Amino acid sequence: MVAVSSLLQGAGVLGTKAPFGTKASLIAMVLAAVLFTIGWRLAVSKRFEAHRWVQTAAVCLNAVPVLAWMIRFFVLYVLPEIPAKLGERSYAVTTVHALVGVVGLTLGVFVDLRGNELMPARLRFSNYKLFMRSSYALYMLATLTGVIVYVVAYGSGLR
Ligand code: HEM
């Protein structure tokens, strides 16, 4: 059986020569976005316990590539070129993406800690709907801008 790591290397999977970490992150983030959407539908159908579990899993799945890959990548290769190269498409789109991502991840973790009753009393909010809708929207926007970062950096794989 072919190992997943070798499948993710080279041009075979996703049709590009992007590094392993990039491809693994892309797949994890798309899966997390699907989970967030399933979790949202569970809340709409009032299955709140399942909703809480699915969103918690999605928050964890989303946080791993950000903490293990993206922040390091950003600090090493993008940050040193800012502001000098902000006029270039790839740097501009990655910077916008990183800003949306930081806010989305922070808000998402905050909401998830609250939902799991792990938040200190003084930070507890009760306007769940506003916080959850905002963090869902930001996660989706971060995923969309992340996919744009991938396409700008590595091409669509169709050429
Ligand atoms: C909700 C949070 C986030 C989501 C859903 C998300 C999603 C994605 C996706 C789908 C990609 C394309 C796959 C890849 O190139 O690795 C990507 C790339 C990237 N993201 Fe994020 N991201 C998030 C947060 C962040 C944060 C907080 C930072 C930096 C502070 C960041 C920096 C980057 C960078 C530098 C890349 C390009 C990495 C590469 O080319 O390998 N992202 N992101």
Image (tube, rainbow, N blue to C red):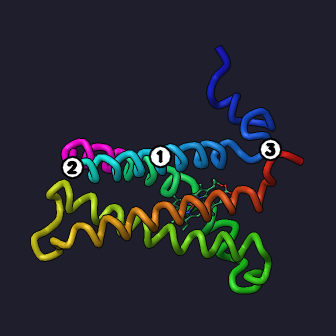
Q: Looking at the image, which residue sits at the far bottom?
A: 83
Give the Cα distance between marks 3 and 1: 25 Å
Give the Cα distance between marks 3 and 2: 43 Å
Q: Looking at the image, which residue sits at the far front?
A: 45
Amino acid type for the residue under numbered disc 2: Lys
What is the quadrant of residue 118 in the picture? bottom left
The disc placed on residue 17 is 3
Give the residues in magenta. 46-57
Using the image as rendered, state which of residue 88 and residue 6 is in the foreground.
Answer: 88
Amino acid type for the residue under numbered disc 1: Val
Q: Position of residue 7 (x, y in %)?
A: 70, 29
Ligand 1 positioned in quadrant: bottom right
Q: Is residue 126 magenta?
A: no
Q: Nearer the viewer, mark 3 or mark 1?
A: 1
Q: Position of residue 139 (x, y in %)?
A: 46, 62
Amino acid type for the residue under numbered disc 3: Lys
Q: Position of residue 9 (x, y in %)?
A: 73, 36
SS of the residue at dot 1? helix
Decide if residue 100 is on the left or right side of residue 50. right
Residue drawn at (27%, 52%) of the image? 43
Q: Label 1, on which residue?
A: 34
Q: Is residue 53 magenta?
A: yes
Q: Position of residue 106 (x, y in %)?
A: 38, 68
Q: Specify the quadrant that holds the N terminus.
A: top right
Using the image as rendered, state which of residue 40 and residue 139 is in the foreground.
Answer: 40
Residue drawn at (62%, 66%) of the image? 74
Decide if residue 100 is on the left or right side of residue 131. right
Mark 1 / mark 2, whichever is N-terminal: 1
Tell me which secondary structure the magenta stretch mostly adopts: helix
Q: Label 2, on which residue?
A: 46
